[in-house]
Amino acid sequence: MATAQLNRARTVKKLEKPRPLKLNQRNSTVDGRITTVEDIVSLIDNVAMQLTNGFHDRTLQMNVISMCSHLKLYANQLEAIYKDQLDRAFVAIRNGSQDDRLDLTTRVHLLELIELRAKQWRHTDSMDVYYMQKLSHLDNVANRGSPRYTYQLSIVPFIGDDFTDFGADFGTW
């Protein structure tokens, strides 16, 4: 009787793809459209494709801003799971940050992402203040519309910046 039980084939369950992970929304300001890690990865891939193909429109700027805010919150989890995809996307992000055809606000957000990833996604208050000041300065200049200021903003770092508060990391710019 024991041999009859051993000869019986075991049934194997079909493995299914796991459901997407839900983002923890208690402490975040995630909009209704991006609710999973896969949504963020899809956004990153979309931005990389737009940068690579030269689609520099208002949609790209909104996507970059959204990507930047989501990566600030969830980059550590994404880095662990999707490192290869992030590596490929950051090639396009680095190239895009140097593209003169891209608007300055988008370029500043891309530079912030490059710096954050270089620092293993650890940001400091001084970094946050620095980039908020740059974006605020860009908004003020855009409202003035002066070509002289626009030319100055195309130089990174911006003319007249004092890097003494930021340490040696900014000394090589």
Image (cartoon, helix red, strand yellow):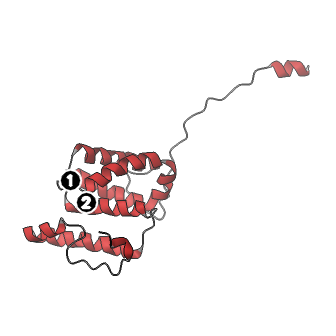
Q: Position of residue 169 (x, y in %)?
A: 37, 71
Q: Residue at x 25, y 70 (%)?
A: 157
Q: Secondary structure at mark 1?
A: helix
The residue at which mark 1 appears reads as: 58
Quarter containing the C terminus: bottom left
User: Above or below — where is 25 with respect to 91?
Assistant: below
Q: Nearer the viewer, residue 7 or 121?
A: 121
Q: Residue at x 40, y 58 (%)?
A: 70
Q: Residue at x 12, y 71 (%)?
A: 149
Q: Nearer the viewer, residue 105 or 14?
A: 105
Q: Residues within 10 Å of mark 1 (few under 14, many from 20)?
A: few
The residue at which mark 2 appears reads as: 107
In three-dimensional space, the C-alpha distance between marks 1 and 2, rounded to whole angstroms, equals 13 Å
User: Above or below — where is 162 with respect to 33?
Assistant: below
Q: Quadrant of residue 100?
A: bottom left
Q: Amino acid at mark 1?
A: Arg
Q: Position of residue 38 (x, y in %)?
A: 44, 46
Query: Is residue 30 shown to the viewer in this render?
Result: no
Question: Who comes first in sequence, dot 1 or dot 2?
Answer: 1
Q: Position of residue 14 (x, y in %)?
A: 62, 29
Quarter containing the N terminus: top right
Q: Residues within 10 Å of mark 2 (few under 14, many from 20)?
A: many
